[in-house]
Image (tube, helix red, strand yellow):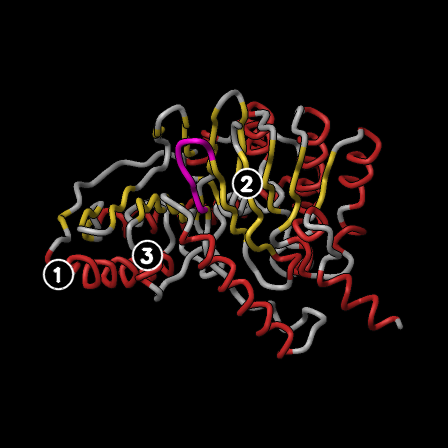
């Protein structure tokens, strides 16, 4: 046995999550154990939504009892439990670095989270452990995205240039904040260890855990912040969990996935339910083209295409090309619900409405 996995909870099951339990002969890793209720536009009643959230919490907590390691790719509530600190007892916690490549709201959430961890496990206040941070220089993040940087967007080029300039100004303000904030150190108490894994490799027996450097949560200079992706390898098998790359929208992130060429890919989709608001047609087109490339250019035997995507009933129509290319190429492209033999909840709701 190399790498096996369980899809603990995903959006297609009725509550926002991308929680995955991955097992190797050496270790069990629970990725992004969090859940949030569906948005008001989701076609289901409030009691149904609350029921699915309760189901998700129960399933995630049960999976947590079987995990040695917990991975938190960023501090959005559908990716971690901010208050149930006992959930992390006995675990190695590999969590997003709260000191850099983070927006202001997630920094505040991280401060609260690690304050609770210090109080619960160490009986100390986080304030007493904070360090003065040495100032660090950060270059233009677009230098790490040569494909996206050099892509011709035709009539959209001028607008894109303006947005990138605004984004760079926002980024510089974040750098000032990072350099001005106190540093939250990695933590170790009886019952828990916290490490920041971006860009690092870990080995447990014959199992390799690798983590990407910080990636934008969606588009370039996304105000939502940064995340990281997780790669787990054992016995010649590889699973990759994308976290929130939103499609991916950025071409270089698609290239990263293609080069990794995982056997199993847990891929979040574009936020089609936000089309016309946080997602425009240009970036939806990018996400579709990138997903098509991933389907066509990898040997991946299974792509779980979920999270963000099945939050509106026309998600397959809005990403039709991806599904058609997968079917034509004989690739297994499924939502988590479909992998588990169920219909996505958003489609169940639509079919019941039609009846």
Q: Is residue 107 visible?
A: yes
Q: In front here: 133 or 211?
A: 211
Q: Which residues are magenta?
A: 24-30
Image disc number at residue 50: none
Q: Is residue 162 visible?
A: no
Q: From the viewer's perspective, is residue 19 above or below residue 1?
A: below
Image disc number at residue 5: 2
Quadrant of the frame with the C terminus: bottom right
- Identify the residue at image location x=33%, y=55%: 88
Q: Secondary structure at mark 3?
A: helix
Q: From the viewer's perspective, is residue 3 above or below residue 282?
A: above
N-term-proximal mark, 3 vs 1: 3
Q: Are marks 3 and 1 in contact (CB under 8 Å)?
A: no
Horizontal and vertical percent position of residue 296:
73, 27
Mark 3 lies on residue: 107
Mark 1 surroundings: few (<14), some (14-19) or many (≥20) residues within 10 A: some
The tally of labels here is 3
The stretch drawn in magenta includes residue 163: no
Cα distance between the residues tagged 3 and 1: 20 Å
Horizontal and vertical percent position of residue 300:
65, 28
N-term-proximal mark, 2 vs 1: 2
Q: In front here: 302 or 274?
A: 302
Q: Nearer the viewer, mark 3 or mark 1?
A: 1
Q: Quadrant of residue 69?
A: top left
């Amino acid at each position: 046995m190399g790498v096996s996995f369980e899809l603990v909870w995903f959006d297609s099951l009725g509550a926002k999550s991308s929680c995955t339990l991955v097992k190797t002969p050496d270790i069990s890793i629970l990725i992004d154990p969090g859940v949030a209720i569906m948005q008001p536009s989701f076609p289901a009643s409030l009691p149904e939504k609350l029921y699915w959230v309760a189901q998700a919490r129960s399933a995630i907590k049960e999976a947590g009892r079987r995990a040695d390691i917990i991975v938190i790719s960023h501090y959005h509530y559908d990716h971690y439990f901010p208050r149930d600190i006992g959930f992390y007892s006995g675990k190695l916690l590999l969590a997003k670095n709260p000191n850099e490549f983070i927006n202001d709201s997630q920094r505040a959430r991280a401060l609260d989270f690690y304050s609770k961890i210090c109080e619960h496990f160490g009986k100390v206040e986080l304030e007493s452990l904070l360090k003065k941070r040495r100032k660090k220089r950060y270059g233009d993040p677009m230098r790490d995205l040569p494909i996206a940087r050099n892509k011709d967007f035709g009539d959209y080029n001028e607008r894109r240039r303006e947005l990138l300039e605004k984004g760079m100004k926002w980024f510089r303000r974040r750098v000032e904040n990072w350099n001005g904030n106190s540093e939250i150190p990695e933590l170790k108490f009886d019952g828990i260890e916290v490490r920041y894994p971006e860009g690092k490799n870990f080995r447990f027996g014959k199992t390799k855990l690798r983590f990407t450097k910080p990636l934008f949560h969606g588009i370039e200079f996304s105000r939502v912040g940064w995340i990281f992706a997780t790669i787990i390898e054992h016995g010649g098998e590889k699973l990759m969990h994308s976290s929130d790359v939103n499609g991916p929208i950025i071409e270089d992130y698609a290239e990263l996935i293609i080069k990794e060429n995982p056997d199993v890919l847990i891929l979040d989709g574009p936020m089609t339910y936000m089309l016309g608001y946080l997602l425009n047609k240009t970036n939806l087109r990018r996400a579709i083209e990138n997903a098509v490339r991933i389907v066509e250019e990898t040997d991946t035997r299974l792509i779980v295409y979920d999270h963000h995507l099945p939050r509106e009933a026309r998600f397959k129509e809005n990403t039709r090309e991806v599904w058609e290319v997968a079917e034509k190429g004989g690739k297994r492209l499924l939502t988590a619900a479909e992998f588990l033999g169920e219909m996505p909840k958003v489609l169940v709701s639509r079919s019941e409405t039609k009846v």
